[in-house]
Amino acid sequence: MGYEIALNKAWDELLALSPGKNQEVKFLADTYSVDLAQKNVLSLACNVAAKDFTTILILHYLAHKIKGFPQPTGEWLPFRKLSGIEGYYSAFRARSIEPIIRKYGTNPTSLLKVLERLPAKEAKHGDVAVVLETFPEIPVLISLWRADEEFAPEANVFFDKTVTQIFCIEDIVVLAGIVAAAI
């Protein structure tokens, strides 16, 4: 019930833009089938309905893809530098940065194992970094810094500066949380 209004709004927006054909969307290591007539999104990897928050992201991605969105610029911004984030940083940090630090803080190079199972490539950033292709043309950079005598390990999630032209801040927080769980 918590996502019902957002889901209905996302379906309505997509249906108003779409010619009515079913769609397929790559998201991380999965492909999702979007059935416009039945209003459902199905993971093709495991043949189950996508979770509501994933469905909303996929529908928003498709709507913006149809409208046309900017090509990634390669200019990476941390969440704190995105406009309109007021009040969201603590949720963002709790859902994305802290889980990454818990998982990789003591062994940052183990982050590179995601290259074997997700659409990602190693990047030159921090001590260890990867760029994940979350959706086609929607990259996310995960960067880790090792602990030293003065500082605990740290992580950050960076987005191409065009991300706010594609997703709202709530979607970006959800996307980062999904990425953190997937890696």
Image (cartoon, helix red, strand yellow):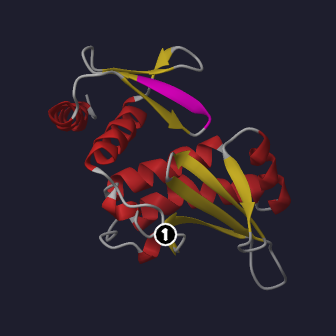
The reply, left or right, for residue 119 in relation to residue 176 is right
The reply, left or right, for residue 160 in relation to residue 20 is right
Q: Is residue 51 above or below residue 145?
A: above
Q: Nearer the viewer, residue 123 or 104?
A: 123
Label 1 crowding class (10 Å Cα cut-off): few <14, some 14-19, many 20+? few
Q: Nearer the viewer, residue 165 or 107?
A: 165
For the image shown, how many numbered marks are present on the structure? 1
Q: Which region is colored magenta?
A: 29-33
Residue 95 in percent (x, y) is at 51, 53
Quadrant of the image containing the N terminus: top left
Residue 23 lies in quadrant:
top left
Q: Nearer the viewer, residue 55 or 80?
A: 55
Q: Based on the picture, tell me whether residue 30 belongs to the magenta stretch.
A: yes
Residue 82 lies in quadrant:
bottom left
Give the residue displayed 80% in from the left and 72% down from the top. 146
Q: Based on the picture, tell me whether residue 144 belongs to the magenta stretch.
A: no
Residue 102 in percent (x, y) is at 70, 55
Give the residue displayed 38% in from the left and 32% down from the top. 55
Residue 136 in percent (x, y) is at 51, 46
Residue type beneath disc 1: Thr
Give the residue displayed 34% in from the left and 55% down from the top. 69
Residue furthest bottom as drawn:
150
Secondary structure that dominates the magenta span:
strand
> Secondary structure beneath disc 1?
loop
Q: Is residue 175 above or below residue 98?
A: above
Residue 27 in percent (x, y) is at 52, 38
Give the residue displayed 52% in from the left and 57% down from the top. 94
Q: Which residue is mark 1?
A: 73
The reply, left or right, for residue 110 in relation to residue 40 is right
